[in-house]
Image (cartoon, grey):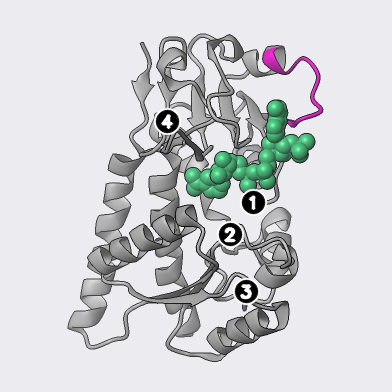
């Protein structure tokens, strides 16, 4: 029976660090970090996420500004909002809640955020810096994946890592970060042949496909570390891409959903907001 990687518990240390940072600034009469979140439309999953994020900000002493915009907003008006936030010196980090409605071009819109406030690491500038290995804001979800693997105490160097999924926000950057850790990385996607046997070769399996309970124990090598990024809704509950109940019997470590990758991701985002504040003071 494998161990559960408790993302929420692991994130606690970092949350304490953030709290100390904001309390220290307050006690010196300095400004505290402020995160602005833009949410377009009424998607219940997005509203739930933003709500939880705001609660956590409050707990940790980070100010928030949530801008709710109508589902049918034009690209031009949305970009105007982003530019206002870029100009506003009281805002240190900007997050655009994804996915956006279909008529809006996500790549174009996320790239309008000033890269110094791009705490989610999605702008072209931060992406370019990231793949060139320069200091920048790293996308929080893949960063969370690496944090959680490290926390198991296992070494990543030289390991066979399989990343299932190749999106720009999760799969590709997760693969790049693990490559930076000297893993031997294979990226799989919907056209990969013999998917089960490729996955079964992984010492570390990262799953980010958005297909609930897709990865069963047949995909997992005995003693592998399995990181489940998926968050789908199944029968009204949040559900991962991994069939947790059976995979835990084969793997050495598995992340639960919820309480795994997501918990760490939000915390890393808030850490980036603190960093953005400090960077902008110089
Ligand atoms: P995405 O953009 O839809 O990408 C899904 C990827 O999975 C694609 O590369 C796709 O392959 C691949 N794929 C789909 N079905 C497959 C199959 N049957 N076999 C092999 N590969 C398959 O999704 P995403 O934005 O990366 O998100 C993935 C999941 O992570 C979603 O559940 C999302 O909600 C979740 N997520 C969680 C967090 C968090 O913090 N916990 C953050 C972001 C996303 P092709 O490229 O060939 O189409």
Range of magenta residues: 186-196
For label 2, being within 8 Å of ligand 1 is answered: yes
Looking at the picture, how far across and down is residue 268, in whole percent? Answer: 43, 56
Ligand 1 quadrant in view: top right
Question: Label 1's element?
Answer: loop
Q: CA distance from mark 4 to mark 3?
A: 31 Å
Q: Nearer the viewer, mark 1 or mark 3?
A: 1
| Rendered image: mark on residue 120 | none
Asked whether the beta carbons under mark 4 and mark 3 sit within 8 Å of each other, the answer is no
Q: Identify the residue position indicated by label 1 in the image.
A: 169
Q: Is residue 137 left or right of residue 57?
A: right
Q: Identify the residue position indicated by label 2 in the image.
A: 98
Which comes before the other along the chain, label 2 or label 4?
2
Q: Identify the residue position indicated by label 3 in the image.
A: 115
10 Å crowding of disc 4: few (<14), some (14-19), many (20+): many
Looking at the picture, how far across and down is residue 162, in whole percent? Answer: 65, 27
Question: Label 3's element?
Answer: loop
- In this rendering, is residue 189 above or below 280? above
């Amino acid at each position: 029976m494998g161990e559960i990687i408790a993302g929420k518990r692991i994130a606690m240390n970092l949350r304490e660090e953030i709290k100390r940072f904001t309390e220290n600034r307050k006690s010196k009469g300095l400004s505290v970090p402020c995160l602005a979140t833009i949410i377009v439309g009424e998607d219940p999953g997005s509203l739930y996420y933003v709500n939880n994020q705001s609660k956590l900000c409050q707990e940790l002493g980070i100010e928030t500004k949530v801008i709710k915009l109508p589902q049918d907003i034009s690209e031009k008006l949305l970009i105007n909002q982003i530019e206002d936030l870029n100009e506003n010196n009281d805002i240190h980090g900007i997050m655009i809640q994804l996915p956006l409605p279909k008529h809006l071009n996500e790549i174009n819109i996320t790239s309008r955020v000033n890269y110094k406030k791009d705490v989610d690491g999605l702008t072209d500038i931060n992406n370019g810096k990231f793949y060139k290995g320069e200091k920048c804001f790293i996308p929080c979800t893949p960063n969370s994946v690496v944090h959680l693997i490290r926390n198991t105490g296992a070494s990543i160097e030289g390991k066979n890592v399989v990343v299932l999924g190749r999106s720009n926000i999760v799969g590709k950057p997760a693969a790049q970060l693990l490559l930076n850790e000297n893993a031997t990385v294979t990226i799989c996607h919907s056209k990969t042949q013999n998917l089960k046997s490729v996955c079964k070769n992984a010492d570390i399996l990262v799953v980010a496909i958005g297909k609930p309970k897709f990865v069963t124990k047949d995909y997992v090598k005995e003693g592998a570390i399995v990181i489940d990024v998926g968050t789908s809704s199944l029968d009204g509950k949040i559900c991962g891409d991994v069939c947790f109940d059976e995979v835990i019997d084969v793997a050495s470590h598995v992340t639960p959903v919820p309480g795994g990758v997501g918990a760490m991701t939000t915390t890393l985002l808030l850490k980036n907001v603190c960093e953005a504040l400090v960077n902008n003071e110089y």
